[in-house]
Amino acid sequence: MKRWVIIASMLLAGCSTTDVAAPEGKTNTVTVERVVDGDTIEVRSENGKVEDVRMLLIDTPETVHPDKPVQPFGQEASRLTKELLPEGTKVTLERDVSERDKYGRLLAYVWKDDEMINQVLLREGLARVAYVFEPDTRYVDEFRAIEKTAREEERGIWSIENYATDRGFDEALSDDPDCAIKGNINRSGAKLYHLPGGRSYDEVKPEEMFCSEQDARDAGFRRAQ
């Protein structure tokens, strides 16, 4: 479908013209295995292959980066993506031009039904437009318009002055280093949290970081033995 047809349809339906209404590129359907963080998910294809998918043209604050602390609104972005894409959810991956990034991850616009998750994160102020590299710029104009609205309304990351920049997120404003409790989902699907100093703490790769045990329990995790 041509873009002008999509925009006309959105106007008739009373929708914002900044939203992309339907995929324009090649697509394939996969199943969500887990959410890594706000802008990265792990999926299983129809042939059983499991791969990481990096959402195109957006960047959410870090929650699981090995060399960075938890950043403001990183947990909120991760939680929103987890709420929208629980394990077992069927999603549509829309490719732009490039198939993978330099880390081997699939690059995609991620659709659940008629909603693009990349857009949702931008709209809620939990992501910024980023990593804009030709030729993978199909929706950059629409994304920048959505980001502009979120910034003007001071949503999420835009509520902290000078936090989100065109170079990333200001690490000087990262969350309290005491937010060091690691939430991990093991091979059996159990959601466990690990305290600093615990027997396997250093080896655990977190799905989410927490500032208190109560935060971890509220998110559905229980303390590792």
Image: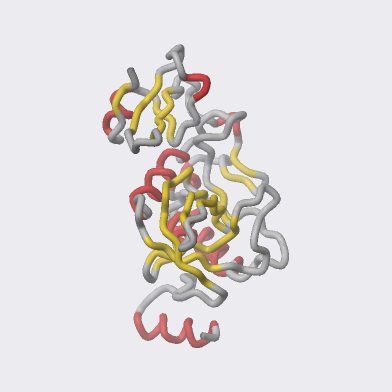
Give the answer, above or below, for where 85 lies relative to 74: below
Q: Position of residue 94 (x, y in %)?
A: 53, 68
User: What residue is shown at x 42% (from left), y 85% (from top)?
Assistant: 9
User: What residue is shown at x 35% (from left), y 28% (from top)?
Assistant: 192
Scheme of colours in the image: secondary structure
Which quadrant of the rendered structure holds the C terminus?
top left
Q: In the depicted view, which residue is nearer to us: 68 or 155?
A: 68
User: What residue is shown at x 46% (from left), y 51% (from top)?
Assistant: 125
Give the answer, above or below, for where 122 lies relative to 206: below
Q: Position of residue 31 (x, y in %)?
A: 41, 58
Q: Position of residue 156 (x, y in %)?
A: 44, 46
Residue farthest along the front direction in this orientation: 47
Give the answer, above or below, for where 26 lies relative to 33: below
As drawn, is 215 to the left or to the right of 115? Answer: left
Q: Quadrant of residue 153?
A: bottom left
Q: Quadrant of residue 194?
A: top left
As drawn, is 220 to the left or to the right of 141? Answer: left
Give the tally of numbered discs.
0
As drawn, is 213 to the left or to the right of 73? Answer: left
User: What residue is shown at x 35% (from left), y 82% (from top)?
Assistant: 13
Q: In the depicted view, which residue is nearer to us: 28 or 18?
A: 28
Q: Quadrant of residue 135?
A: bottom right
Q: Position of residue 27 (x, y in %)?
A: 52, 71
Q: In the depicted view, which residue is nearer to us: 46 or 190?
A: 46
